[in-house]
Image: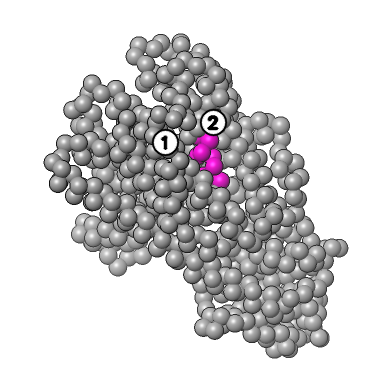
């Protein structure tokens, strides 16, 4: 099974077609902007440059892919060079996603021997809305090239299973492990490849499987021990990880290892809003005591959505099992279905150490698993189509087309929302720059608006505006590196002032807090600059004089 075999119908026109589909689906992504974590990444890289690639990592951390070294290089290139221009990073992500879609086509075509199955799988992967965050969020796009390496690794491993070519096995292991240095989404290969070794051959001995995969298993075992040790001794601040806030480690991991794959399997086929729009009916019907309660949405988007997802998973597996039973002599079908299920299920193992807030995990975590779901969908559609009369078959393909188009609509609806956020965020920053084009050695911003965005927050960002302003004005040379390196003012709603030998900077959105700090630190109101944003006109108004007068009154400090 050669990856670029000319006889596989993997003509460049197929890649071109898939690229067009991907670009049409994701065209709005080029109008979006930094959402959240990108600001921290940009600030982190700004303070250290290339020295940040490995200088804070031990030899063991580097060896076991801790810190995502290749991802750091990726962000240094795209964020470090282009900074606030996201077009290059999204162009890379979209092209890489198109390449992955082509690889999925190639994989299904080789396994199933069906062009229709290949096209259905590839288009489903290309337009799948559940894992679209990996393409549409700048902070998550490293998932896409990591998946590219995983798919190439998988091709070579299957080639090894069919040809006994040890060189292909070694290349597969190298590329698969290399993907971990971009993102750990491929940790499941340490389970997947040994399982495929036995699924691909009848009567293979365990001893032979261990020997054939010895190098992979040794590295995987060392990595597992190292990561578990890190997790056990992680500080309580490691938010989102099991055990970080009490409750133990072992039981949550075991529970997640069962629940996450079983619920997420079906969720890969259904956009989240479809399930979340349906569950309120069940809650109102079966759990009337939640009606009118603050827990209504939590019940629906948690346990009830889990139950629906679990039922959906059982249904899909039943249908696939029935299809396999009908054509039990078809080796290609068995391999396609087995690989699809394993990819879909095992891809969630890297996330069992994470907590989730709702039934769906973060969307980017589904991206790799969707490759397995695509294999299964391609198989199921082809199986049903072959057994239909021509007219019914055409109607069935139209229904599948509408289903795929629904995913496109879900992606574009989300992108439209992100574009709205991006436009306001960019306008907000441009207005600040217009009002305050030059930074001083000592600057304190008081910025408020006539609108509340997230809770009581008066600015349209998902993390601290103070940190964003540090990054935004860093090239002025007035922001000390230590402020960015220490995440000063990073948290949403964080306010404060800090002074070092290299300069001082502060940000506030509450005048009373600013007054307290002015009095406490003996800061002259003369270094405070006040601005108010009008959400209606999208203009920043200079209120500096008024703010300084009020500060002088509140704090008793003269101008």
Up/down of 144 relative to 63, above or below:
below
> Is 434 one of the magenta-colored residues?
no
Residue 545: quadrant of the picture: bottom right
- Report the magenta residues as a range: 142-150
Residue 478 is left or right of residue 530, and the answer is: right
Q: Are marks 2 and 1 in contact (CB under 8 Å)?
A: no
- Residue at (54% x, 40% y) in the render: 146
Query: What is the secondary structure assignment of the residue under circle 2?
Result: helix
> Is 145 one of the magenta-colored residues?
yes
- Residue at (81% x, 86% y) in the render: 558
Mark 2 crowdedness (10 Å alpha carbons): few <14, some 14-19, many ≥20: many
- The answer to whether any part of residue 338 appears in the image is no
> Where residue 402 appears, x then y in whole percent?
27, 54
Question: Dividing the image into 4 quarters, which one contains the C terminus?
Answer: bottom right
Question: Dividing the image into 4 quarters, which one contains the N terminus?
Answer: top left
- Residue at (32% x, 30% y) in the render: 112
Which numbered disc flags the more N-terminal residue, 2 or 1? Answer: 1
How many numbered dots are placed on residues in this image? 2
Q: Which residue is mark 1?
A: 10
- Examine the residues drawn in magenta and state their main secondary structure: helix
Viewer-side label of 2, 1: 1
4 or 210, nearer to the observer: 4
Mark 1 crowdedness (10 Å alpha carbons): few <14, some 14-19, many ≥20: many
Mark carried by residue 211: none
Mark carried by residue 176: 2
> Where residue 400 appears, x then y in whole percent?
26, 49
> Where residue 446 appears, x then y in whole percent?
68, 77
Distance from disc 2 to disc 1, alpha carbons, whole Å, reads 23 Å
- The answer to whether any part of residue 335 appears in the image is yes
């Amino acid at each position: 099974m050669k990856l670029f075999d000319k006889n596989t119908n993997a003509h460049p026109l197929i890649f071109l077609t898939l690229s067009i589909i991907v670009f049409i689906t994701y065209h709005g992504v080029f109008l979006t902007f930094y959402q959240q974590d990108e600001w921290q990444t940009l600030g982190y890289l700004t303070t250290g440059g290339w020295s940040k690639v490995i200088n804070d990592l031990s030899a063991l951390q580097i060896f076991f892919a801790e810190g995502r070294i290749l991802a750091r290089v990726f962000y240094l290139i795209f964020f470090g060079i282009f900074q606030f221009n996201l077009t290059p990073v999204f162009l890379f992500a979209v092209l890489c996603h198109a390449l992955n879609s082509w690889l999925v086509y190639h994989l299904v075509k080789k396994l199933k021997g069906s062009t229709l199955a290949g096209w259905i799988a590839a288009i489903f992967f290309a337009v799948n809305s559940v894992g679209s965050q990996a393409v549409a969020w700048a902070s998550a796009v490293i998932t896409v090239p990591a998946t590219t390496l995983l798919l190439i690794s998988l091709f070579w491993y299957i080639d090894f299973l069919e040809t006994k070519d040890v060189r292909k096995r070694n290349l597969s292991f190298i590329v698969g492990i290399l993907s971990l240095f971009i993102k750990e989404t491929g940790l499941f290969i340490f389970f997947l490849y040994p399982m495929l070794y036995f699924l691909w051959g009848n009567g293979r001995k365990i001893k032979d499987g261990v020997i054939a995969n010895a190098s992979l298993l040794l590295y995987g075992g060392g990595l597992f021990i190292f990561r578990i040790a890190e997790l056990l001794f992680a500080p309580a601040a490691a938010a989102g990880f099991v055990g970080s806030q009490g409750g133990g480690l072992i039981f949550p991991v075991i529970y997640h290892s069962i629940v996450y794959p079983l619920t997420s399997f079906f969720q890969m086929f259904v956009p989240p809003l479809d399930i979340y729009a349906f569950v309120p009916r069940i809650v109102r019907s079966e759990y009337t005591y939640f009606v009118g309660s603050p827990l209504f949405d939590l019940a629906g988007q948690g346990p009830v959505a889990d139950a629906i997802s679990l039922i959906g998973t059982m249904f899909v597996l039943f249908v696939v099992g029935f299809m396999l039973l009908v054509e039990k002599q078809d080796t290609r079908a068995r391999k396609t279905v087995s690989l699809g299920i394993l990819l879909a299920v095992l891809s969630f193992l890297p996330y069992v150490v994470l907590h989730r807030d709702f039934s769906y995990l973060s969307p980017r975590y589904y991206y790799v698993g969707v490759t397995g779901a695509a294999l299964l969908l391609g198989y199921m559609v082809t199986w049903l189509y072959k057994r239909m009369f021509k007219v019914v078959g055409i109607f069935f393909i139209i229904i599948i087309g509408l289903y795929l188009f629904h995913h496109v609509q879900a992606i574009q609806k989300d992108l439209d929302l992100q574009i709205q956020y991006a436009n306001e965020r960019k306008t907000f920053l441009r207005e600040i720059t217009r009002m305050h084009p030059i930074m001083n050695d000592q600057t304190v911003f008081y910025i408020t608006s006539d609108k509340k965005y997230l809770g009581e927050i008066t600015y349209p960002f998902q993390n601290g505006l103070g940190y964003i302003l540090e990054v935004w004005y860093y090239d002025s040379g007035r922001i000390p590196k230590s402020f960015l390196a220490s995440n000063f003012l990073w948290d949403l709603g964080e306010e404060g002032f800090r002074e070092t030998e290299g300069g001082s900077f502060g940000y506030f959105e509450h005048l009373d807090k600013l007054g307290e700090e002015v009095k406490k630190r003996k800061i002259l109101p003369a270094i405070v600059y006040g601005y108010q944003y009008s959400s209606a006109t999208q203009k920043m108004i200079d209120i500096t004089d008024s703010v300084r007068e009020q500060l002088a009154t509140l704090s008793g400090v003269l101008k």
